[in-house]
């Protein structure tokens, strides 16, 4: 769960501050389209990766998503055009559109049935906690939104390390044990 909280920090910042960022760049008229591209990326990725999630190809999906999200957020440092804004929205949508159902499968796949409601609530809390918005608010005043968005890339690295060192092994071991139990 901790890796999910780190990975969701930039998402909160993007949702809360993209319109202000676009206004700073003189692109405020394009902000609604940024969100349209974000949603389009999410829809495409959610529908196109479900079979890979069901097949247990979690690690490749997490790595692909985190690398893409990292470079997309880093590109905010150089964002100046509407096309770049649209591409960033689409790529953010792809990345989070993969991670959201993937993390939901982690939560439901590793939690006993009577505790799944509490586990889902904790998972959804990573979206609502507002750490990304809070951090971006602090960054906005001192270093600006471009650099602030770029700094949030660090949270992808931290979340990815937690995933690689703990979550992937734990989830794989748990799924293997569940398969053994179902075969018996």
Image (cartoon, rainbow, N blue to C red):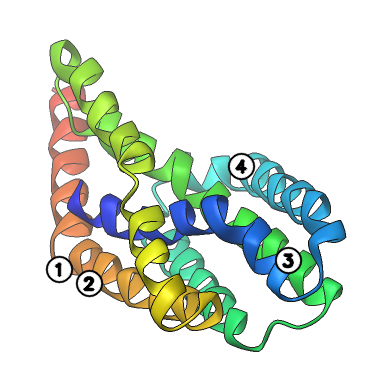
Residue 60 drawn above or below residue 38: below
List x then y, in percent, for residue 139. Answer: 39, 73
Is the residue marked by circle 3 packed among few (<14), some (14-19), or many (20+) residues within 10 Å?
some
Q: Nearer the viewer, residue 20 or 91?
A: 20
Residue 16 drawn above or below residue 179: below
User: Mark 1 and 4 residues: CB-CB less than 8 Å, in contact?
Assistant: no
Q: CA distance from mark 2 to mark 3?
A: 34 Å
Q: Classify mark 2: helix, strand or loop.
A: helix
Q: Which residue is mark 1?
A: 165
| Total labels drawn | 4
List x then y, in percent, for residue 72. Answer: 58, 75
Is the residue marked by circle 2 packed among few (<14), some (14-19), or many (20+) residues within 10 Å?
few
Q: Nearer the viewer, residue 165 or 53?
A: 165
Q: Classify mark 4: helix, strand or loop.
A: helix
- Residue for point 34% across, 56% down: 134
Q: Which residue is mark 2?
A: 161
Q: CA distance from mark 3 to mark 1?
A: 40 Å
Would you say 18 lies left or right of 170 here?
A: right
Q: Which mark is residue 46?
A: 4
Would you say 41 lies left or right of 75 here?
A: right
Q: Nearer the viewer, residue 169 or 145?
A: 145
Is the residue marked by circle 4 packed among few (<14), some (14-19), or many (20+) residues within 10 Å?
many
Quadrant where the C terminus sits is: top left
Q: Which residue is mark 3?
A: 23
User: Mark 4 and 2 residues: CB-CB less than 8 Å, in contact?
Assistant: no
Question: Of marks 4 and 3, which one's residue comes earlier in the chain?
Answer: 3
Q: CA distance from mark 4 to mark 3?
A: 30 Å
């Amino acid at each position: 769960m901790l890796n999910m909280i780190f990975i969701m920090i930039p998402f909160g910042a993007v949702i809360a501050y993209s319109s202000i960022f676009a206004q700073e760049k003189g692109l405020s008229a394009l902000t609604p389209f940024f969100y349209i591209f974000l949603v389009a990326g999410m829809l495409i990725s959610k529908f196109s990766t479900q079979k890979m999630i069901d097949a247990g190809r979690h690690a490749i999906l997490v790595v692909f998503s985190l690398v893409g999200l990292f470079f997309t957020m880093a590109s905010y440092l150089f964002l100046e055009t509407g096309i770049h804004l649209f591409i960033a929205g689409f790529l953010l949508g792809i990345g989070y559109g993969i991670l959201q159902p993937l993390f939901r499968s982690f939560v439901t796949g590793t939690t006993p049935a009577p505790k799944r409601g509490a586990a889902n609530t904790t998972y959804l809390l990573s979206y609502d906690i507002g750490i990304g918005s809070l951090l971006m608010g602090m960054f906005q005043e001192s270093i600006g939104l471009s650099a602030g968005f770029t700094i949030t890339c660090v949270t992808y690295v931290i979340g990815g390390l937690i995933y690689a060192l703990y979550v992937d092994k734990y989830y794989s071991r748990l799924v293997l044990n569940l398969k053994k139990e179902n075969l018996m």
